[in-house]
Image (cartoon, rainbow, N blue to C red):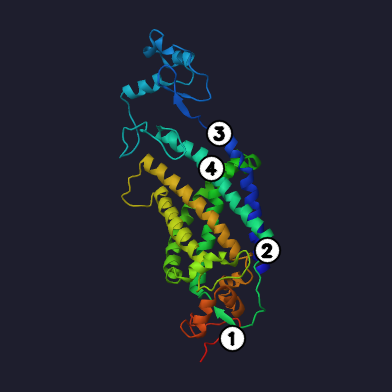
Amino acid sequence: MFRVTSRFVAAFVAALALGLSVSLGASAALAADAPATLTPGPQTGTAQRADQAAAPPGASTIPGYLQQTNGERAQVQPGNNAPMWREIKQQAGFSSLPDPEAGVLIQPQTAYPGSAFTSAGEAWRQTRNLLLIPVGGWLLILALVGIGAFYLFRGKIRLEHKPTGRKIERFTPFERFMHWVLAFSFIALAVSGIVIMFGKFFLLPILGSAFFGWLTYALKTIHNFIGPLFGLSLVIVLLTFVRDNLPSKSDLAWLAKGGGLFGGGEAPSARFNAGEKIWFWVGVLFLGLLAVASGLVLDKLVPNFPYTRSAMQVAEIVHASATILFMAMAFGHIYIGSVGTEGALDGMRTGYVDESWAKQHHTLWLDAIKSGKIPAQRSGPNAQAPVPVIKPKA
């Protein structure tokens, strides 16, 4: 089972890295496809595209300049559509947008991270295409490449001593069930989210527009339905493990030694070490809840929320940012908990770890069990362990 899981994780990581590396063409492609930065026009103070030729000197002094039609303006200032938009703003019309945006056709100007100061819709588009996609893609690739380089340099963290055969219950059946619900829902969301955000760069040329359109629609539907399940399991996991993830003085010593990741052994730690606690508080709690909250807004599942275009734009930016950072951290968590550390996966797969593993990675936790402060069999005396469970010292 462990070998199969290890191969699956390695194959998944390799495929994901390959797909995202292809999507790096997004940086150049989007730079050419997305609107260029708007800069003030030379004579008029109007906005024009930076990749367009400057307006002829004195264009604004042409007789009848302010009365030009959009076609006439294009002759002297290509790309300046001010006459068209001025006419739209001055005319009364009908807008089918629902409250609270009834009658608002063009959003006010604003600036989102990485965008120019322009209409909100265009600002959101620039943020997504020029910041979130290329930077997010690079971040995920660098996370995967970093994990691969670490594995080649450090290799698997092996047990320093032979297994004793004495097993300690690390996770109860309920804890393992909720963890796997969270894990599999995360995989579904990660795969669907990556295809939705980056798929047009590495899947569309292969699958074609028809099949890719069907695939992204299906994955979007799956994403929308799995999201609430992920959120519910996330909250349960947080409540289940929060007590054992509270910071302690031993965490500083663990961090000072780098967790033994680069050799030298680990500093003694309790049930969860400082690295796992950082993942819990920063990854699961902060980024996880941020992703869930913004996702519920995008799914329109928050009662009495003002679902305006600007609110949805901000929610999408927050959601994409949080989920990309969450995935980058999750890759490290998955690696350390599976192929990166010998015996780690057994704890979540069977619920039990060997005493040698506990002594090497969580000495303080093992000492508390041997002293009787923590029960070695937390799921009850009738639970079936793989082999006899370690007994506390009399």
Camera-near label (2 vs 4) is 2
- Please give the residue where the numbered disc 4 appears in the rendered image: 133
User: What is the spatial separation of the Cα atoms under label 2 and label 1, in whole angstroms?
Assistant: 31 Å
Residue 241: give x, y in percent of width and height. 45, 69
Report if residue 33 is visible in the image. yes
Give 201 or 31, whichever is nearer the viewer.
31
Residue 155: give x, y in percent of width and height. 68, 63
* Residue 322 higher or lower than 31, as above or below: below
- Please give the residue where the numbered disc 2 appears in the rendered image: 155
* Disc 1 residue crowd, few under 14, some 14–19, many 20+, Cα 10 Å: few
**What's the amino acid at mark 4?**
Ile
Name which residue lies at 52% across and 22% down. 52
User: What is the spatial separation of the Cα atoms under label 4 and label 1, in whole angstroms?
Assistant: 52 Å
User: Given contact means CB atoms under 8 Å apart, are the residues at marks 4 and 3 in contact?
Assistant: no
Say whether disc 4 or disc 3 marks the residue closer to the N-terminus.
3
User: Given contact means CB atoms under 8 Å apart, are the residues at marks 2 and 4 in contact?
Assistant: no
User: What is the spatial separation of the Cα atoms under label 3 and label 2, in whole angstroms?
Assistant: 39 Å
Name which residue lies at 51% across and 52% down. 325
Give 232 or 30, whichever is nearer the viewer.
30
- Please give the residue where the numbered disc 1 appears in the rendered image: 388
Report if residue 12 is visible in the image. no
- Please give the residue where the numbered disc 3 appears in the rendered image: 31
User: Given contact means CB atoms under 8 Å apart, are the residues at marks 3 and 2 in contact?
Assistant: no
Say whether disc 2 or disc 1 marks the residue closer to the N-terminus.
2
**What's the amino acid at mark 3?**
Ala
User: What is the spatial separation of the Cα atoms under label 4 and label 3, in whole angstroms?
Assistant: 11 Å
User: What is the spatial separation of the Cα atoms under label 2 and label 4, in whole angstroms?
Assistant: 32 Å
Mark 2 falls on what kind of element?
loop
Mark 3 falls on what kind of element?
helix
Say whether disc 3 or disc 2 marks the residue closer to the N-terminus.
3
